[in-house]
Amino acid sequence: MKQSTGITIIIPTKNERKNLGRLLKSILQKRLPREVIVVDNHSTDGTIQVAKRMWNDATKKGGYKFSPRTQARLSAWLVSQKRKKSETPDRRGKEYIVTDLPQLTLLSKGPERSAQRNAGARIAKGSHLLFLDADMEMTPTLLPELQLLAKKGVKAANLKELAVGHDFWGKAIALERNCYWGDPILEAPRFIEAKLFRHLGGYDSSLIAGEDWDLAERLNQNGTPVVYAKSPLLHHEAMGFLPNIRRKWYYTHHIRRYARKNPGRFLKQSAPRMRLNRYWENRRMLLRYPLYTLAFLLMKVLIYGRFRLSNK
């Protein structure tokens, strides 16, 4: 594959209709990267249709600022689409390209997010890869900053993820997540040079949980310096107690494979003392929101109890 300069954004999805539009809009509002690849795990809620409609609306309504060259490409594509009545997917086993819009590729792949991200990386043309989740939202200064880091030859970067909640439990979880800013043992790079990513073998597709930490550990063993981007990335937390606890229990159940592969790192990550130290360092923030603090501590107890029971 011929390598191009620029950034490829890779987004794994599964039934993310409610979230994906917000992320794509945040990408479009600033400037287009080299390409965006949405890798969908056979969603049944219309996730792919949201991506198509979002991109089509952006090109037709002119609600976003495009360069003259990009606008010419989009206009040519719209003319070509009027001549087509339908598109036939190019099926290649379980993996197939559904459609290819200007700078947007929709790809179907499963079974989990590691395989989805790797599938996107295999066809990416950018010199650097940015892995985002559908429940995230880019701030206006993030992409320009990452483009500058890429030009400087940065190999990998952690992003400052600012968690945002929209109901009681979402705000409680966001409060906890925001205690971990700048902790290298709990954070993992989302921005990485494509050549380096492929050299390391990408994400371990056998891992359902902890695959990002596993990649961070391999970067560390490779001696790759990891920098921190200053611009924040918004991470919108799920709403409701049951959806959140079910998701956390799911990944807690599957974290054992990661723990066996990276026992030293996992021992540090799972130590209650380490988490308590982070809470103590952020005690002023936690004291401002006592109910949210008690709520996420309750959830941590339930998650830890489930983990202990599953390992008996």
Image: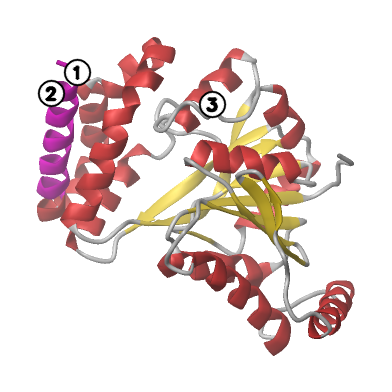
Q: CA distance from mark 1 to mark 3?
A: 22 Å
Corner quadrant of residue 40: bottom right
Residue extent of the magenta highlight: 293-312
Closer to us: 245 or 107: 107
In this image, 5 relative to 144: left or right?
Answer: right
In the drawing, what numbered circle is on residue 309?
Answer: 2
Quadrant, the N terminus: top right
Q: Are marks 2 and 1 in contact (CB under 8 Å)?
A: yes
Vertical order, 259 against 291 (above or below): above
Residue 74 at x, y = what percent? 81, 76
User: Which secondary structure dominates the residues rendered in magenta?
Assistant: helix
Residue 307 on the magenta segment: yes
Whether residue 190 can be seen here: no
In the drawing, what numbered circle is on residue 311?
Answer: 1
Disc 3: which residue: 204
Earlier sequence position, callout 1 versus callout 3: 3
Circle 3 packing at 10 Å, graded few (<14), some (14-19), many (20+), is: some
Q: Are marks 1 and 3 in contact (CB under 8 Å)?
A: no
Which residue is depicted at the point 73% across and 50% down?
A: 7
Mark 3 residue type = Asp
Corner quadrant of residue 191: top right
Mark 2 residue type = Leu
Which residue is depicted at the point 64% across and 46% down?
A: 95
Whether residue 244 can be seen here: yes
